[in-house]
Amino acid sequence: MCPPHIFMQLEKLTPVRVVKADNCILCGHCVDVCPVHAIEHSEIPYEKVHKIDYNNMPSPEQLMNLLHARRSNRTFTDRNIQDDAFEQIIEAGYYAPTAVNNRGVKIKVVSDPEKLKQVLDYVLDTFGEMAKKMRESGEESSADGYFGAAMLEGLVKAAKRGKDPILRGAKYLMVFTSNHKMGLRDCQLAYQNSSLMAQALGISQVYLGYVCNAYEEGDKQKLKDILGVEDEIQTVMALGIPAFRYTNYTERDF
Ligand SMILES: Cc1cc2nc3c(=O)[nH]c(=O)nc-3n(C[C@H](O)[C@H](O)[C@H](O)COP(=O)(O)O)c2cc1C
Ligand code: SF4
């Protein structure tokens, strides 16, 4: 049960010993598994240990229903998302696993319209530069043929016509950051937890891959400064109350 095997029983019917306690990753499995609180962990006080209500679990059918309902609904309205909803969405993210329980993920909500405009401009400027370089080098399409100069220029042109093909007019962004070497994976898992909680609250979210692409290719510090984060930006979510709910879902082949 203890990932780094800190509890050792060298022989049957002898007391369990604690060995190499420094290897503890603070996962809490030892205190969470013991029904009679026999394990005292100096870093995990009992006030923080809570009973799981197994009578109040979503059924597999209910969970699958939520997974079917979760869609990238980009029809964000002007309606506000309440603070307590954000708290639940963020809390859900923090319950995702992280590599060696590093818990390096940080989740931040950004809603200042001026900052959002700066993010949009940052992405468009970076895409414009990328397209220019592609044209100059003669390599106008990417390996997968999708992320090429024409596509990037198309996004910039759409924005000039007054559309927002990047943030989709969202009033809220949620930024997932981590400096851990597994930070991208950690943030993706946190993202998915948060997206499911958002869906459960009737809030739509869209994964902003374009912002991530621009960050990877552009001036990283500039986007960090705009968003007010210090750690590496791993993924970004747009959120909002959608104009409608999808009535149906389409079966996926697997
Ligand atoms: C890694 C990743 C990047 C994405 N980037 C964008 C994006 O930049 N803009 C956007 O509108 N949707 C983006 N999406 C949403 C996908 O287009 C969407 O998940 C997919 O079409 C399936 O639709 P569904 O989420 O409604 O099931 C992204 C999704 C993922 C997983
Ligand atoms: S909290 Fe530490 S001692 Fe307890 S199970 Fe996790 S790694 Fe082992």
Image (spheres, helix red, strand yellow):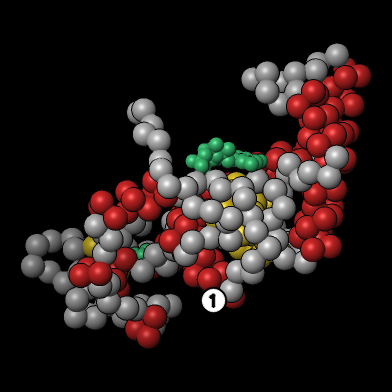
**Quarter holding the N terminus?**
bottom left
Residue found 80% across the figure and 49% down from its top: 120
**Quarter holding the C terminus?**
top left
Compared with 208, 147 (above or below) is above
- Give the image quadrant in which the ligand numbered 2 is located: bottom left
Q: Is residue 117 visible?
A: yes
The kind of residue on which mark 1 rests is Asp
Q: Position of residue 124 (x, y in %)?
A: 83, 41
Residue positioned most to the left: 13
Residue found 60% across the figure and 69% down from its top: 81
Compared with 131, 225 (above or below) is below
* Camera-nearest residue between 144 and 23: 144
> Could you say whether the residue bearing mark 1 is in a helix, strand or loop?
helix
Residue positioned most to the top: 138
Compared with 152, 121 (above or below) is below
* Camera-nearest residue between 32 and 244: 244
Q: Position of residue 95 (x, y in %)?
A: 44, 63
Disc 1 designates what residue? 84
From the viewer's perspective, tell me whether residue 196 is left or right of residue 237: left
Q: Position of residue 230 (x, y in %)?
A: 74, 61
Residue found 22% across the figure and 80% down from its top: 38
Q: Position of residue 50 (x, y in %)?
A: 32, 78
Is label 1 within 8 A of ligand 1 (CB to nearest ligand atom)? no
From the viewer's perspective, tell me whether residue 142 is left or right of residue 47: right
* Camera-nearest residue between 189 and 89: 89
Q: How many marks?
A: 1
Residue found 26% across the figure and 51% down from its top: 61
